[in-house]
Image: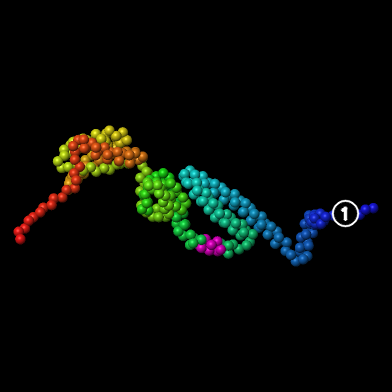
Amino acid sequence: MQDQPEAAPEQAADNTVNEAVDAVTSMDPNTILEFLRNNGIDSSLFVNFGKDLIVAILIFYIGRFVVKLVVRGLTRVMDRQQVDTTLQTFVGNLVRVALMVVVIIAAIGAIGIQTTSFIAIFGAAGLAVGLALQGSLSNFAAGVLIVLFRPYKVGDYVEAAGIAGSVEQVQILTTVLKTPDNKQIIVPNSQIMDSIITNYSANDTRRVDLTVGVSYDDDLDKVTATLRELVDADERILKDPECQIAVLELADSSVNFVVRPWTRTSDYWGVYLDLTEKIKKRFDDEGISFPFPQQDVHLYTTEK
């Protein structure tokens, strides 16, 4: 009769483990408790630890669920406020990490472990990071304020921090501007919030301010009528509010008229440039002169 092949080592190990598990599970709980008492082990410690462990697990899973709800609600609020997507993601992740740290510390505390040292470590780490990233955090805070209060948006033409240009991007730390000559300028958000912001695109309409000087010899009524005719002929100029045409000042060499038509913001530069050219050509046709700066020089002769 041939010998049976020996079982593989893995199979033998599995059999041993299964036998041990069956032995433990088949034991009477009272027998286990009696064994612990006979060996001087307080069974209440295991019972209390088991309860604390269950509470810690519940705190972790319930806390994680609550964190998800908070982050989801915050994202919806930012979405209704039309907050930039990049900022939504960044703020959501930041809030999620901060709340999960609180949940984990609470779960650890439920087990009975002192969490004072953990809080001190997190506090020291946060202080170190804050000091190292002081400038970046300032720019981040300014970026949040820009997105929330929206002093400008993408596409607006603004002047801020001494720079003028069209807004291309509003990022977490910086704002990207494009100048009229197609240069890209990246400005830190903190510098923008610390300066005066002029938004030329905020309103639907703008006023064009022109100053036109004529000779003292010209007929002022004719000048006014000519300017009024040019303004009325341009369909881009709004009827309401009415364009103001009046004598501004009696200057040294000319009588200066002010011409202030209103137009849509998108038509501002077209009206400004076209109206300036039309005034020059029409005044030439009407014989209205543009005086050059004049200065009288008096010469005196003295006898030697």
Q: Position of residue 66 (x, y in %)?
A: 58, 50
Q: Residue at x 54, y 46 (%)?
A: 72
The amino acid type found where label 1 is placed reads Pro
Q: Residue at x 34, y 39 (%)?
A: 267
What secondary structure is found at the residue carrying circle 1? loop
Q: Position of residue 161 (x, y in %)?
A: 37, 53
Seen from the viewer's position, the closer of residues 83 and 10 is 10
On the rendered structure, is 268 left or right of 211? right
Q: Position of residue 274 (x, y in %)?
A: 29, 38
For label 1, the crowd category at 10 Å Cα-Cα, with few meaning under 14, some 14 to 19 and many 20 or more, is few
- Can you identify the residue that label 1 sits on? 5
Q: Is residue 94 magenta?
A: no
Determine the image quadrant of residue 233. top left
Query: Which residue is at the far bottom?
Result: 40
Compared with 23, 182 (above or below) is: above
Query: Which residue is at the far front?
Result: 304
Write down the region rendered in magenta: 120-128
Compared with 283, 44 (above or below) is: below
On the rendered structure, is 11 left or right of 194? right
